[in-house]
Image: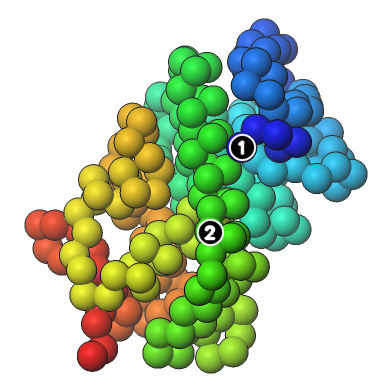
């Protein structure tokens, strides 16, 4: 998975940046470094980046703004936010930012490497499957190109959003707990807050539902988690 995959670290603290770089390079990743948001965006524009490890607190434009620009210009890029303990996951993972994952400082660099690998699996999973298209009501999922459509119009999804909706559409009517979604999308080694599932589901509803406050497709199963409504 690491072969020729390029990771961009956007972090103004040099010792953190270098430490993360060493650990990623040990796993065979190609690593780019940026000490500011502007520098990071320039690198992303000129090189094919698979995953960005992005600090929130940066000189110049902050990580939130960098995330919004990256998500707009490169919809399928993976983004992992680095955050302080005092920052709220709802804000970090908010609808306007499109973050795939987050880590709280100080963090174990080995865990960060595992998060990067997990995110790459979400980005590149299923490209060799024989059955490449799923039709579900007004939706079409092309698993080869990892594109998702509603009524023929493409809906841009982050890698994590795509993995969640793929899980739902392939299992209509099945109720998934938050822990099950965490394990199947983020991986069994994920140690973060299960609230990350709720934030991603909110983002998905805002993109695919006619009325996100009254969802017709992604149902809440109270006390459990979520399911895709089975129309059959």
Mark 1 lies on a secondary structure that is loop
Residue 74 location in percent, x, y?
A: 72, 56
Q: In the image, is 107 to the left or to the right of 21?
A: left
Q: Quadrant of the C terminus?
A: bottom left
Q: In the image, is 174 to the left or to the right of 129?
A: left
Q: Give the answer, above or below, for where 226 lies relative to 17.
A: below
Q: Which residue sits at x=70%, y=34%? A: 3
Quarter-wise, where is residue 17 in the image? top right
Q: Is residue 114 visible?
A: yes
Q: Is residue 219 visible?
A: no
Residue 158 location in percent, x, y?
A: 56, 58
Q: Which residue sits at x=43%, y=32%? A: 87
Quarter-wise, where is residue 173 in the image? bottom left
Farthest residue to the top: give it: 15
Mark 2 lies on a secondary structure that is loop
The circle on residue 223 is none
Q: In the image, is 215 to the left or to the right of 175?
A: right
Q: Give the answer, above or below, for where 60 lies relative to 184.
A: above
Q: Quadrant of the N terminus?
A: top right
Mark 1 crowdedness (10 Å alpha carbons): few <14, some 14-19, many ≥20:
few
Label 2 vs label 1: CA separation?
13 Å
Q: Which residue sits at x=85%, y=47%? A: 45
Q: Which residue sits at x=55%, y=34%? A: 116
Residue located beneath label 1 in the image: 1
Q: Give the mark nearer the N terminus: 2 vs 1.
A: 1
The one nearer the camera, 4 or 224, is 4
Q: Give the answer, above or below, for where 164 lies relative to 141.
A: above
Farthest residue to the front: give it: 130
Residue located beneath label 2 in the image: 126
Q: Give the answer, above or below, for where 47 lies relative to 139.
A: above
């Amino acid at each position: 998975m690491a072969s020729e995959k390029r990771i961009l670290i956007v972090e103004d603290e040099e010792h953190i940046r270098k430490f993360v770089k060493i650990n990623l390079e040990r796993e065979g990743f190609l690593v780019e470094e940026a000490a500011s948001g502007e520098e990071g965006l320039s690198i992303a524009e000129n090189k094919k980046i698979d995953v960005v490890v992005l600090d929130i607190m940066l000189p110049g434009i902050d990580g939130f703004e960098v995330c919004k620009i990256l998500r707009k210009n490169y919809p399928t890029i993976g983004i992992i936010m680095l955050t302080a303990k005092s920052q709220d996951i709802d804000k970090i993972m908010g609808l306007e930012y499109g973050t795939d994952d987050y880590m709280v400082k100080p963090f174990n660099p080995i865990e960060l490497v595992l998060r990067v690998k997990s995110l790459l699996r979400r980005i590149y999973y299923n490209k060799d499957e024989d059955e490449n298209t799923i039709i579900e009501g007004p939706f079409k999922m092309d698993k080869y190109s990892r594109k998702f459509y509603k009524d023929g119009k493409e809906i841009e999804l982050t890698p994590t959003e795509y993995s969640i909706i793929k899980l739902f559409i392939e299992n209509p009517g099945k109720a998934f707990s938050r822990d099950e979604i965490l394990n199947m999308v983020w991986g069994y080694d994920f140690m973060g807050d299960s609230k990350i599932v709720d934030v991603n589901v909110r983002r998905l509803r805002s993109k695919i539902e006619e009325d996100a406050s009254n969802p017709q497709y992604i149902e809440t199963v109270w006390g459990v988690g979520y399911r895709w409504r089975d129309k059959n």
